[in-house]
């Protein structure tokens, strides 16, 4: 067998592998092709592709990554843009073999285009509905995101909005995300908003210990406790975290969303080999591979599975288990989880040789 055909066969396995994506920021997930359309729609902004994506071999500081989101937000600033972007992102995940997707996004208000936070969420939900109507083979749920940079009042407003949609969206809105520049603000100021969200039945997925300075914050937020953790890069003692943090995560068995390429390109992790996936996976802790921002970091979920497998020597059987176990970490109701389990069982013989 030639090297090329071997490559293709491996690629095919990862693409065919049914997958669950639980950590995807809408505006970070915009593909090159969709970006092209947006750039052409708004030529006056003078935005080029290299301002919206971090290519192969390139690295940026986390701070620079956040500049990239500012540029993308300029390009995506109306209901029309959001509808197009959300539909395209959902279709792309489906084409990559993702069968269940939890998309997250920060509701924004844009005076010039008349966009309100309420309409922002409604538009994302409309995109989800349209994809369902068009029979795109994927189940999509939505997490309303709180940007930590905006402080406690906005966080509380966002939680109220999320609560309304939890009750009125036919089960599409399932939870709340905490994200944004981890070097800005402190989680203690957001604690009451997060607590309120939890009390009203929203599931919590929190970006925790994405940078080393968040140790105290993580101690505090782990007491909520969150239903899932985003990144958790600096939780374990080897990288400046602590035994007490690890103990809290393990005792409460909180699944961790791990995004290899995002962390390597954003330079919070020095290399794929040194990624903390290894630490948690070896302990048998619930781990789920995710893309974070597939557009910005130029990746997709198949590639993330393939990278994890080649870096950490996972067999196809192990990769299959990893993707199947993710079903249990979704915020979907039990009947949906059962449906997904069935789908995995049906596909197993066909895909896993
Ligand atoms: C790289 N690591 C990360 N750490 C923290 N927050 C991140 C992030 N990547 C993305 N976001 C959050 O998602 C927003 C963009 O999508 P939405 O406009 O919400 O759809 C960013 O502005 C940031 O708040
Ligand atoms: Zn994230």
Image (cartoon, helix red, strand yellow):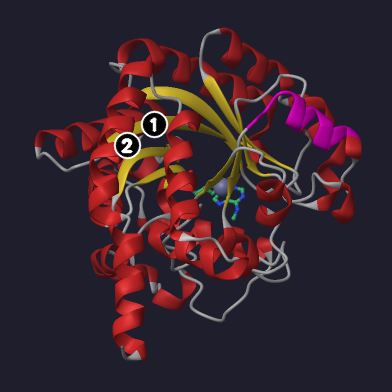
> What residue is drawn where x is 50% and y is 61%?
315
Q: Quadrant of the N terminus?
A: bottom left
> What residue is drawn where x is 61% and y is 35%?
255
Residue 203 in the magenta stretch? The answer is no
Residue 195 on image: x %, y %: 66, 15
Work out whether residue 150 or residue 179 is closer to the camera in this orientation and state it. 179
Work out whether residue 353 or residue 163 is closer to the camera in this orientation and state it. 353
Q: CA distance from mark 1 to mark 2?
A: 23 Å
In the rendered structure, the answer to whether residue 225 lies left or right of residue 218 reads: left
Local crowd size for mark 1, using a 10 Å CA cut-off: few (<14), some (14–19), many (≥20): many
Q: Tag 2's secondary structure?
A: loop
Work out whether residue 145 or residue 115 is closer to the camera in this orientation and state it. 145
Mark 2 within 8 Å of ligand 1, using the beta carbon: no
Asked which quadrant contains residue 38, the reply is bottom left
The dot on residue 142 is: 1
Residue 77 on image: x %, y %: 36, 48
Q: Which residue is mark 2?
A: 114
N-terminal of the pair, mark 1 or mark 2, is 2
> What residue is drawn where x is 61% and y is 64%?
312
Q: Examine the rendered structure and indicate whether residue 284 appears above or below residue 168.
A: below
Residue 88 on image: x %, y %: 24, 53
Asked which quadrant contains residue 190, the reply is top right
Q: Examine the rendered structure and indicate whether residue 191 appears above or below residue 37.
A: above
Q: Is residue 39 visible?
A: no
Q: In the rendered structure, which segment of residues is drawn in magenta?
A: 244-254
């Amino acid at each position: 067998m030639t090297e090329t055909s071997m490559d293709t066969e491996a690629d095919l396995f990862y693409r065919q592998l049914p997958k669950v994506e639980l950590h995807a920021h809408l505006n970070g997930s915009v593909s090159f092709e969709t970006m092209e359309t947006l750039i052409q729609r708004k030529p006056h902004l003078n935005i080029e592709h290299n301002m919206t994506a971090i290519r192969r071999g390139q690295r940026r500081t986390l701070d620079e990554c956040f500049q990239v989101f500012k540029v993308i937000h300029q390009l995506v600033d109306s209901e029309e843009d959001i509808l197009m972007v959300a539909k395209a992102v959902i279709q792309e995940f489906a084409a990559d073999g993702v069968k269940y997707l939890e998309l997250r996004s920060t509701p924004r208000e844009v005076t010039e285009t008349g966009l309100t936070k309420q309409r922002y969420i409604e538009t994302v939900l409309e995109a989800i509905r349209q994809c369902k109507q068009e029979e795109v083979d994927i189940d999509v749920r939505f997490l309303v995101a709180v940007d930590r940079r905006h402080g406690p009042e906005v966080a509380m407003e966002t939680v109220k909005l999320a609560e309304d949609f939890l009750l009125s969206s036919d089960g599409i809105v399932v939870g709340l995300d905490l994200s944004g520049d981890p070097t800005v603000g402190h989680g203690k100021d957001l604690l009451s908003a997060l607590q309120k969200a939890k009390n009203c039945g929203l599931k919590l997925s929190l970006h925790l210990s994405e940078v080393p300075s968040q140790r105290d914050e993580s101690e505090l937020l782990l007491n909520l406790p969150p239903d899932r953790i985003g990144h958790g890069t600096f939780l374990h003692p080897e990288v400046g975290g602590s035994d007490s943090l690890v103990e809290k995560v393990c005792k409460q068995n909180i699944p961790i969303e791990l995004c290899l390429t995002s962390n390597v390109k954003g330079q919070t992790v020095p290399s794929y080999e040194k990624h903390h996936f290894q630490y948690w996976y070896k302990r048998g802790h619930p781990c789920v591979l995710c893309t974070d921002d597939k557009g910005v970091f130029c990746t997709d979920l198949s590639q993330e599975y393939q990278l994890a497998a080649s870096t950490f020597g996972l067999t196809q059987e192990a990769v299959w288990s990893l993707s199947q176990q993710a079903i249990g970490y979704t915020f979907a109701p039990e009947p949906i989880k059962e449906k997904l389990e069935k789908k995995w069982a049906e596909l197993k013989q066909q895909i896993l040789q």
